[in-house]
Amino acid sequence: MSDSFAVKSKPSKSLPDSASWQDYVEYLLSTGMLDAAGIYGQEGGVWAHSEEWDVPSATITEMVPHLKSHGARVPTSIVVNGKSYMVVRVDSNDGTAYARAGSSGVVLTLTTLGVIVCRHSSEKANAGQANLAVRRLADHLRQAGV
């Protein structure tokens, strides 16, 4: 796999062709835009995550149908790592949800088989930059069929 999804504003870490899920999490953290990251199965199973990052399987399984379906009623908040975030937008066209709590935010985005969940804070990067890094990896994984 190439590193064509690398965020251009920060040095990129190239990924080997046979990257592990943990390598993808480390890549996201290496962008310098995210505080925490994890990759989960759409049924809520943990594939890889950064230290002290806990996304309950119930959060994953609750959000997946909303990320896949147009017009589905979206929850007003989600709990990630013990903190409640207000859901501000769900884009089911690309399977992405955005949530905020104070100066930090969470982005959830679907891949073919999984869900990437990451946290960013305004101290590291603006929300748009952080979301772009997550969505680029998701696009890369979708193209690879995972």
Image (spheres, helix red, strand yellow):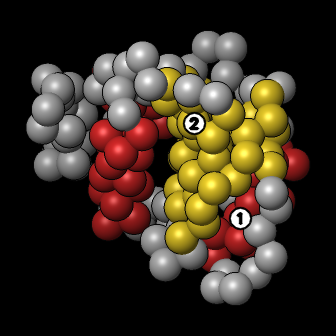
Figure quadrant of residue 56:
top right
Q: CA distance from mark 2 to mark 1?
A: 18 Å
In percent of the image, x 80 and y 76: which residue is there? 73
Farthest-out residue, bottom: 71
Residue 89 left/right relative to 42:
left
Q: Earlier in the sequence, mark 2 or mark 1?
A: 1
Residue 47: x and y in percent read: 62, 38
Farthest-out residue, front: 102
Taking depth in this image into account, of 109 and 89 the one nearest to the observer is 89
In percent of the image, x 24 and y 34: which residue is there? 15
Q: Residues within 10 Å of mark 1 (few under 14, many from 20)?
A: many
In the image, residue 33 above or below residue 55: above
In the image, residue 68 above or below residue 26: below
- Amino acid type, callout 1: Val
Q: Residues within 10 Å of mark 2 (few under 14, many from 20)?
A: many
In the image, residue 99 above or below residue 56: below
- Secondary structure under badge 1? helix
In percent of the image, x 53 and y 61: which residue is there? 96
In the image, residue 54 above or below residue 128: above
- Secondary structure under badge 2? strand
Judging by the rendered image, the residue that carries numbered circle 2 is: 105
Residue 50: x and y in percent read: 57, 20
Residue 75 left/right relative to 30:
right
Taking depth in this image into account, of 96 and 89 the one nearest to the observer is 89
Name the disc covering residue 64, or none.
1
Figure quadrant of residue 143:
bottom left
Residue 101: x and y in percent read: 67, 33
- Amino acid type, callout 2: Gly
Residue 141: x and y in percent read: 38, 56
Name the disc covering residue 95, or none.
none
In percent of the image, x 75 and y 34: which residue is there? 80
